[in-house]
Image (cartoon, rainbow, N blue to C red):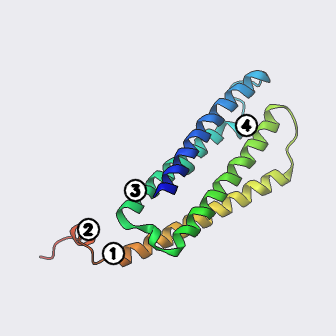
Amino acid sequence: MRKLYVAAFSYMVAGLAFGLFYRELTKLNDFPEGSPTQLASVHTHLLALGMLALLVVLALEKLFSLSRSRLFGWFFWVYNAGVVVTAGAMVWHGTLTVVGQESTPMIAGIAGMGHIVTTVGFVLLFLTLGRALRRDSGSPLAAASEPAAV
């Protein structure tokens, strides 16, 4: 559980820092406000996919002990690798846009790979959660959530 907390906290710090980076870089380069750049959405991606998603997983871990499954470790590292690669590609592409340089197809390919890895992480999370729900189906928590037979 501590790993989830530290990762969520790290994404919060990174998300806020990249929001500040975006604002300051665009001001330094006289980039027109409201002009499209991927750099603008890094802040939101890190806060949503990083911090919020892992806080939800932290709550699920508390309820269902997801980490008892071997798949949970795979989920944690695969998911985080995907989010970091995706955000890194967005920062790279967005920074190039703000400073007026052309982006390359390679950056889009790296971002695409990051999205694929993040998706694999989500699949691993749902497999882990499904196993935990089957394992805990006889627990008092699961029995309390079932409707009473009439």
Q: Earlier in the sequence, mark 2 or mark 4?
A: 4
Q: Which residue is mark 3?
A: 59
Q: Nearer the viewer, residue 35 or 41?
A: 41
Label 1 with label 3: CB-CB less than 8 Å: no
The kind of secondary structure element at disc 4 is loop
**Residue at the spot x=40%, y=73% of the render?**
132
Q: Which residue is mark 4?
A: 37
Residue 49 is situated, as x and y percent measured from the top left of the image, at 56, 50
Residue at the extreme left: 150
Label 2 with label 1: CB-CB less than 8 Å: yes
Q: Which mark is residue 141?
A: 2
Q: Which mark is residue 136?
A: 1
The kind of secondary structure element at disc 3 is helix
Q: Amino acid at mark 2?
A: Leu
Q: Amino acid at mark 1?
A: Asp
Q: Earlier in the sequence, mark 3 or mark 4?
A: 4
Label 3 with label 2: CB-CB less than 8 Å: no
Residue 11 is situated, as x and y percent measured from the top left of the image, at 58, 45
Q: CA distance from mark 2 to mark 4?
A: 46 Å
Q: Name the quadrant containing residue 10.
A: top right
**Residue at the spot x=66%, y=58% of the render?**
82
Q: CA distance from mark 3 to mark 4?
A: 34 Å
Relative height, residue 2 to residue 97 (above, below): below
Q: Earlier in the sequence, mark 2 or mark 1?
A: 1
The kind of secondary structure element at disc 1 is loop
Q: Name the quadrant containing residue 40.
A: top right
Q: CA distance from mark 4 to mark 1?
A: 46 Å
